[in-house]
Amino acid sequence: MFAAFSSIKTDLIIAALALACAGLAVWSYGHNQYRDGVADGQTAMREQAQKDLDAAVEKQKAEDASVRANVESAHVQDVQRAEAAASAASAAQSSVRRLQQLLAAARSAPSASDPGPGRLIDDAAEVSRRFSECVGQYQQVAAGAESDANKVIGLQSYIRSIKKNVDRSPAGGGGLRAGFMLPASQPPASFDLVTP
């Protein structure tokens, strides 16, 4: 009887050991599957984060290119306005010189066909009126050029700050720092962006 009990006891121990080994194998398999799943999930998250970062960098590059194009366009327009202002100022100066010469000639050489001092007064009034118009137009052009110059300076400052932040990135100018996002379509408040 003791032998039968010992045989049952041995069989139970073997069965318990087999069950423990089977449980350990199932636990180990499940643990490895879980660890592989976590690793795959982390890899997928890293890949998605990199894709998001790459997309943000590309979007920022496109926005930077748009801002650069606007700055270049504004600069071209400013140059054209400055050239037009210089041309207008030159034309105004030559008109004033011509009128001054006419006035000086009228004062120095009275002729028989000269109607008298009334004509000189009318001519002087006309010269004064035209000169005032030229000065007014020149002041308008100068004010517009100054406003445009301020806008260009503001845009250049904005682009320099963007470039400085991109250059400081760990990738060495090829990407943005982690967590760094530039404001979308929000240039500094110090100027108004004028698009053609």
Image: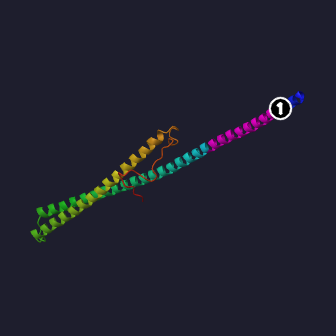
Q: Secondary structure at mark 1?
A: helix
Q: Give the overall secondary structure of the magenta segment.
A: helix
In percent of the image, x 84 and y 31: which residue is there? 9
| Residue 6 counted in the magenta span | no
Q: Nearer the viewer, residue 95 or 65?
A: 65
> Which residue is outermost to the front?
1
Q: How is the image coloured?
A: rainbow
Res 94 seen here: no
Instruction: Report the residue marked by disc 1.
Output: 14
* Left or right of residue 28: residue 99: left
4 to 128, vertically: above or below: above
Picture quadrant of residue 87? bottom left
Residues rendered magenta in the picture:
15-44
Q: Residue at x 81, y 31 (%)?
A: 13
* Residue 96 visible at all: yes
Determine which quarter of the picture holds residue 31: top right
Left or right, 148 with reference to 186: left
Q: Nearer the viewer, residue 194 or 92?
A: 194
